[in-house]
Amino acid sequence: MDSPWDELTLAFSRTSMFPFFDIAHYLVSVMALKRQPGAVAVARKNPLSSWFTAMLHCFGGGILSCVLLAEPPLRFLANNTNILLASSIWYITFFCPCDLVSQGYSFLPVQLLAAGMKEVTRTWKIVGGVTHANNYYKNGWIVMIAVGWARGAGGSIITNFEQLVKGGWKPEANEWLKMSYPAKVTLLGSVIFTFQHAKHLAVSRHNLMFLYTMFLVATKITMMITETATAPFALLEDALSRMLFGWQQQFTPCEKKSETKSSFNGTGSSTSKPIAVASDTVKKKHTKKT
Amino acid sequence: MDSPWDELTLAFSRTSMFPFFDIAHYLVSVMALKRQPGAVAVARKNPLSSWFTAMLHCFGGGILSCVLLAEPPLRFLANNTNILLASSIWYITFFCPCDLVSQGYSFLPVQLLAAGMKEVTRTWKIVGGVTHANNYYKNGWIVMIAVGWARGAGGSIITNFEQLVKGGWKPEANEWLKMSYPAKVTLLGSVIFTFQHAKHLAVSRHNLMFLYTMFLVATKITMMITETATAPFALLEDALSRMLFGWQQQFTPCEKKSETKSSFNGTGSSTSKPIAVASDTVKKKHTKKT
Amino acid sequence: MDSPWDELTLAFSRTSMFPFFDIAHYLVSVMALKRQPGAVAVARKNPLSSWFTAMLHCFGGGILSCVLLAEPPLRFLANNTNILLASSIWYITFFCPCDLVSQGYSFLPVQLLAAGMKEVTRTWKIVGGVTHANNYYKNGWIVMIAVGWARGAGGSIITNFEQLVKGGWKPEANEWLKMSYPAKVTLLGSVIFTFQHAKHLAVSRHNLMFLYTMFLVATKITMMITETATAPFALLEDALSRMLFGWQQQFTPCEKKSETKSSFNGTGSSTSKPIAVASDTVKKKHTKKT
């Protein structure tokens, strides 16, 4: 069957990321870096450190997946053209006269276009990570999910870690305790593509890539326009968490009524705040101790 | 010579860890995680992060030894059955209705049994690490000791590191400055098995495994019953440290009488407190600086 | 052409580092460790931790380059003779009666000799790192620069990281934000030797090694005698940074006059202070947040 739909998705799945989508990805990453407080001052004072941070922002996912598979973390440096591309984008972003790039980027349609193209690269990264991990562990589907996730969303983890080493760690950006939306959607995509790769889904890969990318771009752009943060997974997560971790609450005659009960006999997402507060206070105590 | 003793130890050294001893190890690790402040709240609020932490507690030693030998840290994820086993134990420990598992575990004999079986797995890990490192470096006996130690006791280091990244670092759990008893006894075992592997000990491996395991289990259980912390090495360490690092004190006509003298002209372990305090204050100063 | 000059440099480039230069390197590293506050107390209280830290100081560069190329970080432990050499130097440095070693080392000519010999080992490390990375990535010249740099100057990064894990992190020793002089000169040497290795320099390697080593030793000794910190690169850096990052200032009719202007319309190095202060305050805010 060779329907025009198949031809379209097949052509889409064969698109090369190299010049344009990569540029968009680098641009978005570097702009995100530039928005951090003090980033411009660091770039003026110590350009090498700023360049290194920018590279971590651009290639963080690949570095993390390399580390997880015990491959040289420096491999990304061997791809000279991409390095030069990212470096030049870092340079014009930070040192363009009159800050033209930032001013152009502050124009909303440009942001939407760049963000959409960056989301396209995310799909390619997930698929690459899953297939790459499959070369190592034939039916290690947990590894495939983890590597796909790391390559797709590992940049934030790497940059958090780099800020930890630098001393400027922001706990509200903590990826462990509260997964950001990109991390969630990348995990979902990694699971989907792993199942597809293991032939557990009756969908051809190019169709899946097309649909997943469309979903990514649509949600991302809607979130950017309607400046909402969490969006489409709240309901799903609620149902899932109540199904998996809430059913114990039906056993009413339990001794321990204190905190475990108070956590899910409401609408879940709303009543999970007090516990969040609790754990935060606990963390504060730890940090005070240190 | 095929004495019943040999048969016994040989059969013991061929015991498979897989179902039961691994379960005990996972149970002890997950319960240790659950006892940490805020762990239950995190499990309710963000199960994925709690699951990840539990996996680090269960497979930390293997991960660390993989990192030290530049093997994929994700390899432990490729062993699906063990992952599922540990995950289910994590699940029933944290989300069992009425918290039945914890209540059963709080029953002392259960704890003793589980802890004893966990110590058995420690021997197997040390031997595995030593032989594994020997495949890489033929006569690199320091590497063999280090890898055996890492696989046997590396879990605590990994979990400390993970708490450091999470921001909730507890300096009193610091493995660098003050080695815990398991770390000490694992180091001892790693040295012993390395020497045995290098044919410097006239003991067959299965005998050594049996004796070392018995020693581990006995000391562990006695320590759990008579809630003592340090126990059997204090004297040995004292003698060793005075032999290695104390003999300089006989040279009385030295200029610097201040702190070096005050550290060992007593019973060692007792007089080492003031220096500990000193270094702690130094560390406090650093942390204040940061 | 076989001029005496060539014979001299060739013979020099074939010098073996093993016994004497390595000893000087270990001695300088261990003395630097001993000068840290609380190091002696730690050595008395927990010799194993102190020994581990000393090994990190002695072999940090090699460990970092191994990590960057995904080789076993423990490989340095496989070289038993070097380990025993470094360990014995650590032992006599910390536990020699009457602290003879420190007193001998406090004698200036000894320091000069040891520091000079340590700088010689730096050249050998850089060349080794560059050629080693070249085996992995044929024309990945960025990787070659990075690995040569890591092996030559990575010790300070490793030790900073180790102090971070220990909890005693000193932000003023931060290698990211403010590169130390050894880091700068090692980067320069790594770039030079990479170009030479890529046949872009019309100099034979042994000549280059001789000249670079002479430059290293001369600058190091002059810096130690005339206790200056920054020295010979200030002018070069100034010119370079104004050429690369200062030319945007000619475009006067820009909106944003605030901080970008104030940063380079002076003699650069002097006017970069306020920005430094600014970024420091930013970092302080972060650390307060954590």
Image (tube, coloured by chain):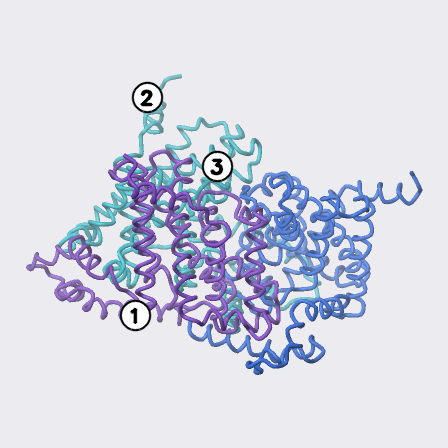
Chain colours: A cyan, B blue, C purple
Chain ID of residue with mark 2: A
Quarter-wise, where is residue B30 in the image?
A: bottom right
Residue wearing tag 2: A4
Q: Is residue A42 above or below residue B10?
A: below
Which of the 4 quarters of the picture holds residue B205? top right
The Cα–Cα distance between marks 3 and 2, rounded to whole angstroms, is 24 Å
A132 w.r.t. B223: above or below: above
The x, y position of residue A99, in whole percent, is 16, 55
Vertical side of B137 occupied by A8: above or below: above
Q: CA distance from mark 2 to mark 1?
A: 77 Å
- Tell me the chain of label 3: A
CB under 8 Å between discs 3 and 2:
no
Residue C35, disc = none
Is C193 in front, or is C53?
C193
Q: Amino acid at mark 1?
A: Thr
Q: Which SS class for mark 2?
A: helix
Reading the image, the residue beneath label 1 is: C226
At a point 20% along the width and 49% down the height, the residue shown is A92
Left or right of A179? Residue C276 is: left
For numbered disc 1, what is the local secondary structure?
A: loop
Which three-letter amino acid code belongs to the residue tagged 2? Answer: Pro
* Farthest right residue in view: B3
Callout 3 amino acid: Ile
User: Mark 3 vs mark 2: which is more N-terminal?
Assistant: 2
Q: Which residue is mark 3?
A: A192
